[in-house]
Amino acid sequence: MKKSSAKKGKSDKKIKELQCTEPEESHPEERGEEHSEELKNVDPTMFDGLCDRMLSALCLLQTSVSEVLDVKDELILQNVPSCVQAQLSLSTSRLFRSLTDLYVPTTELARLVRIFGPQWEQKRQILEQLQGEHERLHRLLALALQRIQHLESQLHKDARSQQYRNWEKLFIRLMRMEPHEPSDKIQKDLEG
């Protein structure tokens, strides 16, 4: 009886070590950083609900494991074959070890999400704005390209029609010209 109460005391002690305490929040002012300008539009508690749900699920898991350990201790006190006792002890110890291995990274992850979550959200908003600006500029560039192509085709069209107009002018001047007109006057008409 003393042996089982000692084992139970040890398992309770291990469970108490894994108390469901929330990690300390790191405030930017405490770290010596000034993020007040960066975090104007971002709610600093936006990821708190997610972190709280994850930590409460971890606490429920710890409670369930402690109940399983209590049941294991009660079963070991009964007349159960030693191979079953050994298998039960090994299985529950693996379960408890897995839980303790899960606790530290989970709380650290929740702490990091609380610290860097608002900054990430702000950067996501900035990226969305940049993407919107990029799409707007892309549309403007496509419009400008269409205008340039239209102007280029118009210039080619005008260049061809200019050749015809020049020939027309030359023909008209030649037709108006008298046969005995000096060549200097012809030269002026052709240039003008």
Image: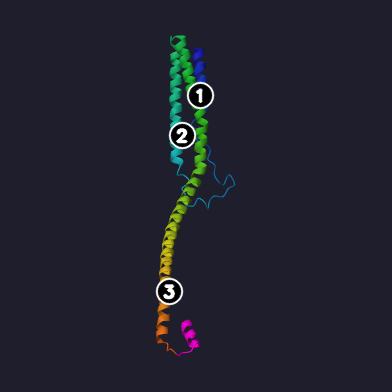
Of marks 2 and 3, which one's residue comes earlier in the chain? 2
Going by the numbered disc 1, the residue's amino acid type is: Arg
Q: Residue 18 placed where, x, y %?
A: 51, 28
Residue in the picture at 44% in, 28% down = 61
**Which numbered tag is attached to residue 55?**
2
Q: Residues within 10 Å of mark 2 (few under 14, many from 20)?
A: many
Q: Secondary structure at mark 1?
A: helix
Is residue 181 inside the magenta stretch? yes
Q: CA distance from mark 1 to mark 2?
A: 18 Å
Residue 152, relative to residue 165: is it above or below? above
Residue 112, relative to residue 10: is it above or below? below
Residue identified by numbered label 1: 97
Residue identified by numbered label 3: 163
Which marked residue is nearer to the observer: mark 2 or mark 3? 3
Q: Is residue 184 visible?
A: yes
Q: CA distance from mark 3 to mark 1?
A: 91 Å
Is residue 8 inside the magenta stretch? no
- Range drawn in magenta: 180-192
